[in-house]
Image (cartoon, grey):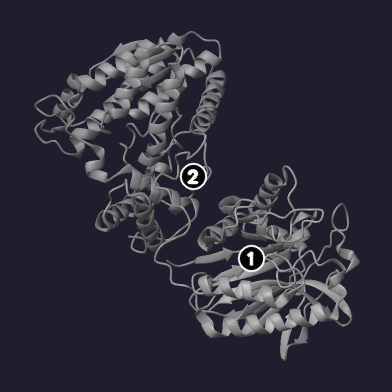
Amino acid sequence: MKNIVRVATIAPEVHIGNPSANAKEIANFYASYGQGADLLVTPELSISGYTCGDLFFSGQLLHQSLQALTFLCEVTKKVGEAGAALLVGAPIVVEGELFNCAVLLHNGSICGIVPKTYLPNYGEFYEKRWFSARKVPTRSLRILGQEVPFGNQLLFELGDSEEKVILGVEICEDAWTPISPSRKLSLAGAEVIVNLSASNEVIGKAEYRRNLIGNISASCICGYVYASAGQWESTSDVVFGGHQLVYENGKKVAECPPFSNDVLVADLMLSKIRHDRMANKSFSDCKLENIMSDYVTCHVEKKWLQKEELKAKIGMTPFVPSKNVRERCISIFQMQVAGLQRRIATTHCKCIVVGVSGGLDSTLALLVSAQAVKNLGLPSETVMGITMPGFGTTNRTKNNSVELMKALGCEIREISIVDAVRQHFKDIGHAESVQDITYENCQARERTQILMDVANKEGGFVVGTGDLSELALGWCTYNGDHMSMYAVNTSIPKTLVRTLVDEIGHHMAQDGNMHMAHIVEDIIDTPVSPELLPPNPDGTIAQKTEDTVGSYILHDFFLYYTLRFGLDKEEVLELCKEAVRQNPAYQFSDAEICKWLDVFYTRFFRQQFKRNCMPDGVKVGTVSVSPRGDLRLPSEIETQLFV
């Protein structure tokens, strides 16, 4: 898999004031992870120990720290270009001043040294007693027989001609300042920020630390790797927990909580970072405030680790909340309701009209409509539900639609489309026995005509039921179910619709309406179908949408990673295979994934003309296909490059 950088963080046992022993501890970890990661990060002053105190003034300690760096250079040389780049913390003397530094080692060389920019000198911290700190322009430093770039405006380009990542380094307190070095480093090009830290534990600090690192990662649109000193540091007055964190664009990727003593290995997806930086023009606009010429990039020639499997957790349903499900669903539902309420108040309509099929989408639209009129203090009958049985309607879906409307107190109307569609077949010269696209679309358009005309007659407007997944695939009839006067599900993908109906339907039935709960459960259990072709002889649904277009689980996965992060087809394919591997409950073969991915790209691009004239609808998540907002594409895209 490409554009993946694997990072590992450790909090090795510290021997305070014994650099040789500390180097051996780090070397032991490197033996295990030096060929299993692209970057291995240790805590602040990991060579000497952070809590050495006045021992930092010892010439012996400083000399032994340099010898430890020599030893670790040899350790990395044995592994060669394919080995992990190693970041360690060490006290370094430069022209008579002592600096708290991060040192990058790879393939036997010291690639660069970054001094700490800000020193804490309050509370339990008093680093200014020992170390110097200021803006240090990048310069060449002679150390251990090597010419090494030194400065806190130094970037590292890690990789080769095939794959590379730009790293920026800051040290502990740097991240806690109002304008942290990481922000300028990110604007200068750093895609991943690495923090070597020694942050002690007090009550509430771990959560504060998570928020701090998460916020930096979000605003800087970067990966952030944080490695803090462990509990072997001195406990004379404080205790250290070895907290380790990896964030990506503000989202936590992995964590070793304080006192867990684990090694953290995580994957960062550079494609996500690069996509969001290109899309977010405010990020690039901030570069005008940054003096780019101050920053120097050091290239580190390194072969990246080949990654057949990802350490990052990849879910099969990225649109569906993985935690706090009920809370998240209620929040989404409230957004849908708020959008519809505003439209009702603006239009001064007498009613809102919903076509109710007994399927998931129309159920959600009906639940939203019922809640909107309730919030406005209007009678429940303000919602007019119309069921329109046709050639493919089954008793199951018809009964569920009627029972759901009864449970919600809606006005109920039933208008069969059979005679009208047969007359239309006769008018256009189409044989009813030819069950083709015309046969299907005539029914969809007849239903839309009924809804629109009833809305005109009653002084109302039509609430659309179509969802985001259908719009993405163009699985809707142009000027049929494609059209409405306000579409409440327009940014809700099919996988999320199912979850919303389940959570909200049962939430609304909590007042003892068990009948409604049973209706919702049966609707969820009903196969997704437009019910435009006649049912089976036993009356069950014959036409199943996913038999034709493929699994909505796959299509929603493709949609999310294509639009949210701009991944190309190859990346989406590999990521989906990895997600299936991580989630064995989803039985999709590689051949199935390839087949339906081709279908997704073909349909997505060829159906843009439908999206370019879609009705209004509220955006609830990070992915939307509205032509007025998130997705502005021409209808005439040539698809050869994408399919």
Q: Position of residue 307 (x, y in %)?
A: 43, 68
Q: Is residue 462 visible?
A: no
**Residue at the image position 54 percent from the left and 58 percent from the top:** 275
Question: Please, is residue 61 above or below residue 413 in the view?
Answer: below
Q: Nearer the viewer, residue 360 or 204?
A: 204
- The residue that label 2 is drawn on is 623
Left or right: where 609 falls relative to 9: left
Q: Nearer the viewer, residue 612 or 160?
A: 160
Q: Nearer the viewer, residue 201 or 565?
A: 201
Left or right: where 443 falls relative to 196: left
Quarter occupied by the N terminus: bottom left
Question: Please, is residue 198 above or below residue 452 in the view?
Answer: below
Marks 1/2: CA–CA distance:
42 Å
Foreground mark, 1 or 2, reads 1
Residue count near mark 1 (Cα–Cα under 10 Å), binned few <14, some 14–19, many ≥20: many
Q: Position of residue 48 (x, y in %)?
A: 75, 72
Residue 388 lies in quadrant: top left
**Residue at the image position 49 percent from the left and 70 percent from the top:** 36
Left or right: where 416 falls relative to 360: left
Left or right: where 239 falls relative to 313: right
**Residue at the image position 27 percent from the left and 30 percent from the top:** 444
Upstream in the sequence, badge 1 or badge 2?
A: 1
Residue 613 lies in quadrant: top left
Residue count near mark 2 (Cα–Cα under 10 Å), binned few <14, some 14–19, many ≥20: many
Q: Position of residue 214 (x, y in %)?
A: 65, 50
Q: Position of residue 123 (x, y in %)?
A: 87, 52
- The residue that label 1 is drawn on is 12
Amino acid under disc 1: Pro
Count the labels in the image: 2
Amino acid under disc 2: Val
